[in-house]
Amino acid sequence: MAARTDLFQSPDYFQVDALLTEEHLMIRDAVRSYVKKEISPIIEDYAQRAEFPQQIVKQLGELGCFGPTVPAEYGGGGLDYISYGLMMQELERGDSGVRSTASVQGSLVMFPINAYGSEEQKRKYLPKLASGEWLGCFGLTEPDHGSDPGSMITTIKDAGDHVILNGAKMWISNAPFAQVAVVWAKDEAGVITGLIVERGMEGFSTPTTHGKWSLRASATGELVFDNVKVPKENILPGVRGLKGPLSCLTKARYGIAWGVIGAAMDCYDTALRYSQERQQFGKPIGAFQLQQKKLAEMITEITKAQLLNWRLGVLMNEGKVTPQQVSMAKRNSCEIATQIARDARQILGGMGITGEYPVMRHMMNLESVITYEGTHDIHLLITGMDVTGFNAFK
């Protein structure tokens, strides 16, 4: 497949860029030019072949996209959350799978080690994860326990200077290539505990998940634990209970809220350009009312989401954000991005299903993103419980 020339121009209808600092804009532009140079020309080919472009791991490390909010002393960027959001937006503009790789590494692997790990764990793992020398993954979801992670059946049993880990995790991004997994399991008292499992530990395997129609350029797999001996120094000492994994998910959902708007922007930009060039009935299709309606609604929803994300980033930086606010932003961004991808596909007509344009790939990817890290319906119920005070989960 011929490499595609990336002509992307970022929509900014309400001059949201004026709310950003010079550093924010520099960081965003650095990631944008990386995507144009290294991701856009190759990603259709990798997605068609359902293959993970392994070279991006080192590239994302060098660019500073792994754990950008982690302190510099551990190899992170020491940046704020708006910088992180902008990075995720630009990566997902390239492909949701590329953003997933960075999200998992930063929010689900490096964040818990930084927040709940011992000093030894931080010094051992964070610099290697930040540089991209090591890839990490996050083991929470199980074959029978997705939206209800508290019912997990993966367990650890005390065995002196180590614990014995048994169970399985499913739908794990990065799993087939990860050197390190942050895994959540129940101890003998039934309390959820985090531990760091390393590739090479006997009884630990990571079978690849095949046959996906979505996130095809992202590596997905299982984590299988068959009497794995994990040293006690690999247990995260700073957290017990469901709060541990849920706090990681809040950070990851924040990155998704920004990320999917990148995919929406790419679909809008592609559809807009196509509508100005494609002629039917003697004029560009962008001159017809129904196409203008689609494009006008796209840019309106993108603009609203940009403002919501910016405000969310301010609250994150000030330490005032609630998980419920993050849930609302994640759900809103995923909903509008999914609709924008579908409308853009319609504007492109038959060309919209080909790899010559990025729209169908985004559309398929977003079907995963709307479900992972809390499904669309679960996030709706989180908001519902927050505003009514009634728990509809049980």
Image (spheres, rainbow, N blue to C red):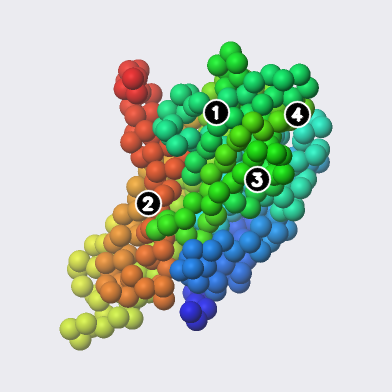
Residue type at numbered disc 4:
Pro
Name the element at disc 4: strand
Residue 108 horizontal side relative to residue 282, left or right: right
Question: In the displayed structure, would residue 152 be above or below residue 125?
Answer: above
Residue type at numbered disc 2:
Glu
- Proximity of marks 2 and 1: CB atoms separated by less than 8 Å: no
Q: Residue at x 56, y 61 (%)?
A: 52
Outermost top residue: 189
Q: Which residue is mark 1?
A: 154
Give the CA separation, mark 2 to mark 4. Answer: 38 Å
Name the element at disc 2: helix
Q: Which residue is mark 3?
A: 136
Q: Residue at x 59, y 30 (%)?
A: 166
Question: Closer to us: mark 2 or mark 1?
Answer: 1
Of callouts 1 and 4, the N-terminal one: 1
Residue type at numbered disc 3:
Gly
Residue 385 horizontal side relative to residue 8, left or right: left
Give the CA separation, mark 3 to mark 4. Answer: 18 Å
Q: Which residue is mark 4?
A: 231
Instruction: Indicate the position of residue 175 as horizontal and vertical percent values.
Output: 59, 47
Q: Residue at x 32, y 75 (%)?
A: 351
Residue 289 horizontal side relative to residue 369, left or right: left
